[in-house]
Each structure stands twice: as structure tokens, then as C-alpha cells.
Image: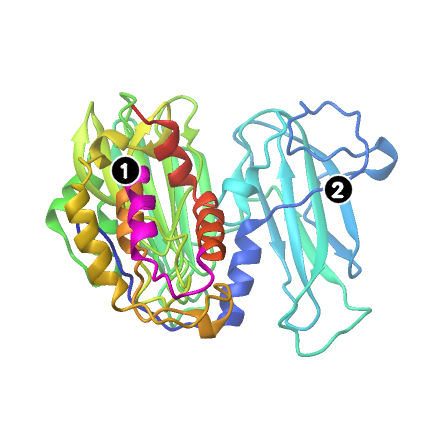
């Protein structure tokens, strides 16, 4: 990664496969009805009336079918530490099943979980919601096609013929099981955490060929980095005083996407919010107060008014604060350039801007050969937004129409960034 901006390299993919992975992992659902059960209501908890819910009794595995564009809601009693899994039949023609599992506390457990097999975190009533959504990549529409769901509390995974790697961290043991590409479980990955021999965390990823744990992350995308491996293997990566494990999932595809899950090994274990950095990975570069400092890049301007290869991606530093990764604005802040230097930068870039009227970033005729807004982003993300707009006013050619439209669209795109919001909320 460069000091001022980052540019990702293009990678090829099968878009149909990427779509199914995204929809299958997202696992988000909401049902606008009313529910007065024992659940603790949160903003994400659907409300289901008692008459609309069905009780599941797990004397054996339960198989449920659901017609297209319909939903089903179930309630079952779960015990902390109990295994639970949902297996889905994903249809290539019409529909994609979508699942949510709400804990007694109201958390959507699958929303922040890899796969659909897990260890239940608490004792009480769980809410399981299943619905079908249309598959826009379907070659044909089958209106009477149904989707199937198998729910089970029986630990039925198999590790036979898999390759295991183990981490022993204090009283905890973490195992990852990988299956060879030529096996019946092609690229399947299973991961578990045990305490005193008892399984306290588990997931399966059926397309997990790019899933890495701790120091393995340093070898992602064939970029071995010994220093990075030392950071990733650090006992306490979040700085809370307890050991932890980090899991990186790279979904593959055209430039996308990196996901990170940090698991703190305490009693009970704590799963931190999923960290998604889109096109650019997290790279640990330093350690402060026992926790790691990372660098990544802002990718919200990918493909914006230019090709992906030319898209400017300003450097972003992150640190852990109260269990979450946040922008390290102190590390990002730099002194502003002098007015003379800003003028030189603008003059140099202005000569490369064509005079075709700007008609919006979605108009291919309006794209720029070189992104003159790269210095603007570097200035903004280093705490110099006022200077960035001074540069913009100087760089835009007087004879080129569409300046205010460009300004408005730039600000709108900037507003979509979670990093930008944090940089601005932490100004000195």
C-alpha cells in the first residue's frame, strides 16, 4: 500500500457464484407483524404474533418447505452451549432462501456469523425466520418451486479426510478443518473453539477456501509477510487484556470482499462486530496499549468517474476502542500544504482535464482519464478538508461545465463512507 493512496488489482470471478455467496452469508430478514413472546425487543427484532409462529420440538431433525415469496416463522427452546444448524437447499432457477435466527436477547445471530451452524449463546426461546426471495440471475422462473430447510440440534458434521490445524491459547483450543478440493466437501471449512474440551463456538463455511485464522492471514493473496504474521499471532489483538482469535474471510470476486471477525477468549467468549473493508485487506502495522494498529484504504470511490485500476483509495488507519475498530485520526492527521503548493498541484492536474461538460458519474462520457480528486481525498483524510475544497476550486477548468454537479456528487459519495464520518467527528 502506498503512503497516500492505494490501488487494488483486478481479479476475475463468476458473478453468479458471488451473488449466491453474498445472499447466503448476509442472512438478514425482517417480518412486519407483531410478537409478544419472551424475546427482548431490539431495533432489529421482528415482531411476530403468537398465532403466526410455530413451535419446533427437536426429537429429530425437522424439514420445512416454503413456497416462493412466502415466509415461515418458528420458535424453539434452546440451551446455552447447545449445537444448532440450518441446512438450506438453494435453487438455481427461481429462489434463494433467506434465514434469520434471533436469540432470546433479540440479537440476529446469523447476521454476524459465518455459515448457519453455531453454538447457542444463551438459554431461552429462539425465533427462526425463513423466507424466499427471487433470484435475479435465474434463467427461468418456476412459480411453484419450493425451498427446503432442515433444522437440527444434532452435531452432524464430519471431519473425516479433512486437514486440521490447531491453536492452543490459554485454556482454549481452536481447530480449523479444511477439506481438499477433490473431496465430497469441496472447499468446505469448519472452525471450532473448545474450553476444557467443550465446544463453545462453531461455524461451517461451505465455500471457505479463502478463510484464514491469525497468522495465516499474512499469506492472503500470496503476499507472505513475516512481520504481519507476528502481529496477527499476537495474543491480544484488541487490547482488552484477554487473548483473542481473528478470522479473515475473503469472498473472492471482482476486487471484493474482505470480512474480519475478532473473537475474544473470555467467559463467555465475546464476538466483536464484523469488520468489512471491501476491496482492501486489513494490514497490522503497529501495536499500542496491547492492541493492534491497522492500515486499510477508503474504497467508497471505487469505479467513481474512472476505472477501478485508477480509482483513488486514500490510506486509513484503524485502532481498537471499546471493542470496535475505529479511525485513528491522530495517526492520519498531517499538516496542510502551503497555498503555493496547492496552486502547483491544481495547475498540474488541471491541464489533464478535458473540457467535455460533466454530466454525472454514471455517464461514461463524463469519466476522467486521471482522477484529479485523488489529492482532495488525501487532504480530507489527513484532516485538511478546507484545503481540499480550495484545491477543487482551483483545479476545475473555467471552461468546463458541471462543476457544481461534480461537487454535489462527490459530497454524496463521501457521505457514504463510515471512515469519513469518523475522521470528521474526531477533529481537534
Q: Is residue 396 magenta?
A: yes
**Residue interval drawn in magenta:** 385-403
Residue 17's spot in the image, x, y percent?
A: 51, 68
Name which residue lies at 67% across and 48% down: 61
Front one among 273 and 345: 345
Circle 2 sits on which residue? Answer: 31
* Secondary structure at numbered mark 1: loop
Between the residue at mark 1 and the residue at mark 2, the CA separation in whole angstroms equals 44 Å
Quarter of the image where the C terminus is located? top left
Left or right: where 160 falls relative to 224: right
Principal secondary structure, stretch drawn in magenta: helix
Q: Is residue 394 magenta?
A: yes
Q: Nearer the viewer, residue 86 or 337?
A: 337
Residue sitting at the far left:
226
Which residue is under mark 1? 384
Say the numbered circle drawn on residue 98.
none
Colour basis: rainbow
Residue 281 visible within the image: no
When the figure is inspected, residue 321 is found, relative to residue 301, above or below; the finding is above
Residue 33 in which image quadrant: top right
Q: Quadrant of the N terminus?
A: bottom left
Mark 1 surroundings within 10 Å by alpha-carbon count, few (fewer than 14), some (14 through 19), many (20 or more):
some
Q: Position of residue 182 (x, y in %)?
A: 38, 72
**x 29%, y 29%: residue:** 238
- Of residues 321 and 391, the one drawn nearer to the viewer in this rendering: 391
User: How many numbered tags mark residues here?
Assistant: 2
> In the drawing, does residue 88 fall left or right of residue 64?
left
- Is residue 210 depicted above or below 126 in this figure? below
Amino acid at each position: 500500500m502506498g503512503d497516500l493512496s492505494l490501488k487494488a488489482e483486478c481479479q476475475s470471478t463468476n458473478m453468479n457464484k458471488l451473488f449466491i455467496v453474498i445472499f447466503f452469508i448476509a442472512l438478514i430478514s425482517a417480518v412486519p407483524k407483531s410478537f409478544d413472546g419472551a424475546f427482548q425487543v431490539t431495533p432489529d427484532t421482528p415482531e411476530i404474533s403468537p398465532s403466526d409462529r410455530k413451535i419446533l420440538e427437536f426429537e429429530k431433525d425437522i424439514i420445512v418447505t416454503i413456497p416462493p415469496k412466502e415466509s415461515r416463522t418458528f420458535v424453539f427452546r434452546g440451551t446455552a452451549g447447545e449445537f444448532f444448524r440450518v441446512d438450506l437447499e438453494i435453487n438455481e432457477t427461481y429462489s434463494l432462501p433467506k434465514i434469520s435466527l434471533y436469540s432470546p436477547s433479540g440479537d440476529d445471530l446469523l447476521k454476524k456469523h459465518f455459515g448457519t451452524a453455531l453454538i447457542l449463546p444463551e438459554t431461552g426461546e429462539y425465533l427462526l425466520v425463513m423466507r424466499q426471495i427471487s433470484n435475479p440471475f435465474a434463467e427461468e422462473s418456476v412459480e411453484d418451486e419450493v425451498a427446503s430447510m432442515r433444522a437440527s440440534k444434532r452435531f452432524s458434521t464430519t471431519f473425516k479426510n479433512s486437514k486440521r490445524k490447531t491453536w492452543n491459547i490459554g485454556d482454549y483450543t481452536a481447530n480449523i478443518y479444511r477439506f481438499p478440493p477433490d473431496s465430497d466437501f469441496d472447499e468446505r471449512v469448519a472452525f471450532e473453539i473448545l474450553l476444557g474440551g467443550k465446544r463453545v463456538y462453531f461455524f461451517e463455511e461451505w465455500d471457505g477456501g479463502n478463510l484464514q485464522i491469525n497468522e495465516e492471514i499474512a499469506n492472503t493473496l500470496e503476499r507472505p509477510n513475516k512481520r504481519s504474521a507476528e502481529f496477527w499471532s499476537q495474543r491480544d489483538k484488541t487490547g482488552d487484556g484477554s487473548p483473542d482469535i481473528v478470522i479473515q474471510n475473503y469472498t473472492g470476486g471482482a476486487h471484493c470482499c474482505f470480512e474480519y471477525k475478532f473473537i475474544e477468549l473470555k467467559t463467555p467468549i465475546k464476538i466483536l462486530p464484523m469488520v468489512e473493508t471491501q476491496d482492501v485487506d486489513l494490514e497490522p502495522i503497529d501495536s499500542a496499549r496491547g492492541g493492534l494498529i491497522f492500515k486499510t484504504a477508503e474504497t467508497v470511490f471505487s469505479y467513481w468517474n474512472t476505472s477501478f485500476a485508477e480509482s483513488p483509495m486514500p490510506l486509513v488507519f484503524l485502532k481498537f476502542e471499546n471493542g470496535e475498530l475505529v479511525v485513528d485520526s491522530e495517526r492520519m492527521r498531517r499538516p496542510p500544504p502551503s497555498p503555493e503548493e496547492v496552486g502547483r498541484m491544481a495547475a498540474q492536474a488541471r491541464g489533464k482535464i478535458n473540457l467535455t461538460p460533466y454530466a454525472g458519474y454514471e455517464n461514461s462520457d463524463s469519466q476522467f482519464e486521471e482522477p484529479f480528486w485523488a489529492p482532495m481525498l488525501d487532504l480530507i483524510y489527513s484532516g485538511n478538508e478546507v484545503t481540499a475544497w480550495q484545491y477543487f476550486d482551483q483545479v476545475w477548468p473555467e471552461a468546463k461545465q458541471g462543476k457544481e454537479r461534480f461537487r454535489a456528487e462527490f459530497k454524496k459519495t463521501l457521505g457514504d463512507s463510515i471512515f469519513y464520518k469518523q475522521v470528521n467527528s474526531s477533529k481537534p
